[in-house]
Image (cartoon, grey):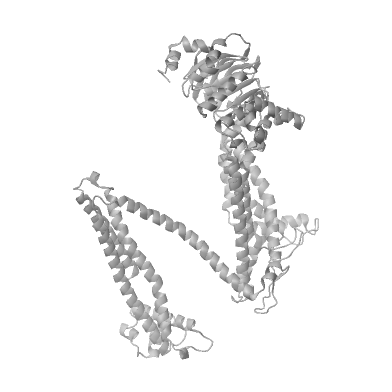
Amino acid sequence: MPLLWLFLGVVAIAAVGYVLGRRRALQSAQGDIRRLHSLPSYYGSNVFIKALVPGIAALLIWLLAQPFYINSTVSGMIPETAIADGSNRGLVMAEVRRTADGLNNAVAVGAMDSNLASDPNADVAVVTQALKDAGQIVTSDITPTVLVAAQSYRAKSNAGRNYMSVLVLLLTVVGAALGLRDSHADFRARNVVEGSVKALLIAAASIAIFTTVGIILSLVFNTLEFFRLYPWTDFFFGLEWAPSFSGRGGSSKLGILPLLWGTFYISIVALAVSVPIGLFAAMYLSEYASPKVRATAKPLLEILAGIPTIVYGLFALLTVGPLLVSVFGKDGLGWMQAGTAVMTAGLVMGIMLIPFVSSLSDDIINAVPQAMRDGSYGLGATKSETIKQVVLPAALPGIVGAILLAASRAIGETMIVVLGAGAAARLSMNPFDAMTTVTAKIVSQLTGDADFASPEALVAFALGMTLFVLTLGLNVFALYIVRKYREQYE
Amino acid sequence: MYDVLHTERNVTQNDVKINAQGVQVYYGDTHAIKDVSVEIEDKTVTAFIGPSGCGKSTFLRCLNRMNDTIDICRVTGDIRIDGEDIYDKRVDPVQLRAKVGMVFQKPNPFPKSIYDNIAYGPRIHGMASSKAELDEIVERSLRRGAIWDEVKDRLQAPGTGLSGGQQQRLCIARAIATEPEVLLMDEPCSALDPIATAQVEELIDELRSNYSVVIVTHSMQQAARVSQKTAFFHLGNLVEYGDTGKIFTNPEDSRTESYITGRIG
């Protein structure tokens, strides 16, 4: 039974359960809704949930578990001798799965007789030719071992599917029956339904959390692998970043410090641009601008946040870089070699961050109670004095939080750096030198044909992990600041 | 204690401090204050009473041009303090507000220390030339605000950490610190418990010796306790204005009588 039909079947049973549950509850109250504990639809939903949840849960678990089970049993059927030199069990199993899929598809389109497909003594050459004729992808000639394994794989999958269909439908019906049994006037159906909705919400929230945990774990394992191949002292304290691209030579120098320095230098330039401009813009918008100006200017400013960062990168590469070169380059002050520099990337990143700072700060400044301003005006303070001495101090923790959020954006930014700051990892104080950041190097280490087991590729995970820890620390610090001062001010 | 106050008031006739003639206030299309004329005396507590939405707070806010901060508000008419038209173009509303202090309904201490809350006004108006002078102003204001003894040991603690009644007295002390001539109070006790209210009322009566105090209140008992003059507002009109004793015992207008006896409001 195809999956879609099975799913629809489960839903159909649950839907019938809804109608029956509702009706049964109404009957038990002699048709008088007021005698029911809950509204009739809750009784229906109760049956619907009790039918749907076990069925779908069983379906999902089976679908996830079946391939593992069949893989391990079928792979046990392949003798060591059948595995060619330079190959491994995994590759042979991939071949088995491909053949099994091919057989399935060929039978489905009618290019192969189903008896032939499941005949263990069939001629391998005939089967291979038939598969090729049916347009199925078969890389090499199928060996008898693979064919037998594939046939077994196919048989087990089909049988598994059938067992699954029966089990799922059975669970659905049993669930519906249990729900129906409860559908009488005294049953607290509303509480059950609301409880299920709560469970759904909890599930949604935990998916986000578990994904984060999964991301961290995947980083951790690869990072540990990297540190097995490369000494961690050299990684954290090395002053040079020079990965060798020759492959497995141990001559790579993978020190993180030049990358961290580039990251911080560019971020500092970006913050030096975005914090004052964003803050002043926020002050104007929230304190001085008329509602009309505010209504137009704020969305306009926020459009900046919607521009893809690659577009900012192009802006850096094509406009800001050449502009800076014409002033600070050979023809001007002579400080700058080429358009790609810390300054270029920092300036453009700063522009990108303006709406972050201004929009968040604007909301925070607006949240300062009007009573504070009235109090200050009432004492004869001007608008400027009020903003400087009352509004800003009251909004400060939130503003600091906004700035730290912008900082973690800056640290994590990639595209602007790739296009604007160049790819040279160096420790330099000159803001007009080309430098690069952690994120840009992660990209360059993972794109390309490096062997995934080499330290040159694995270093990307160590870099990612370091960056993750840094930005996490920054965010925790931001939250701490905000909390600490909030206690004092409210 | 208040009975004593009742008997001794109205003994002296004071000069007119604020003279408002034909004041009209509009919020957009709403006519909030309709042709109000009133003369407020110096060194007197004047109470504005009336049902909610009658315009008493709006009128109070006209007296220090706090309505200027509301975009849609428009004020016409003539309001003079010491004979000077406060809506004249040459008058800086900021200067005016230093002269006409205001205390709000809800205590609104700044998120600063107690000391800085009081020193805020004197600092922005440059009233102290040295730290010692500023210390003196702060102490004097807190003493006049009847809160010195409670906070003298923790002047650097945040003003927001005080209790509601203490916060309101802090706000009154803050308003006094700029040496205003008139003190406007917009329902200063509505967020306070009876004990804090009694403390603030006592304070208001003491302030009378130095300032002209105008207080908006919903509590008629409070108006009777603290004020010498009372103005009754109804639907944007000034219905009756006169000595507090007379308003509460022998009102001329039937609406005033209905309000103070609790029949309308």
Residue at coordinates 72% horizontally, 56% vertically from top-left?
Answer: A343
Residue B165 lies, with reference to residue B23, above or below; the image says: below
Q: Position of residue A235 (x, y in %)?
A: 68, 69
Along the line of sight, which residue is nearer the eye, A239 or A294?
A: A239
Number of numbered discs present? 0
- Is residue B177 visible from the viewing direction of this image? no
Q: Seen in the image, is A169 located left or right of residue A291? A: left
Q: Seen in the image, is A137 located left or right of residue A161? A: right
Along the line of sight, which residue is nearer the eye, B139 or A253?
A: B139
Q: Position of residue B254 (x, y in %)?
A: 43, 11
- Is residue A6 visible from the viewing direction of this image? yes
Residue B16 lies, with reference to residue B193, above or below; the image says: above
Quarter in which the C terminus of chain A is drawn: top right
Residue A93 lies, with reference to residue B96, above or below; the image says: below
Direction left: furthest residue: A30
Along the line of sight, which residue is nearer the eye, A354 or A438?
A: A438
Q: Position of residue A251 (x, y in %)?
A: 70, 77
Q: Position of residue B231 (x, y in %)?
A: 52, 15
Report which quarter residue A321 is drawn in.
bottom right
Quarter in which the N terminus of chain A is drawn: bottom left
Report which quarter residue A110 is drawn in.
bottom left
Along the line of sight, which residue is nearer the eye, B43 or A311?
A: B43
Residue A454 lies, with reference to residue B152, above or below; the image says: below
Report which quarter residue A435 is drawn in.
bottom right
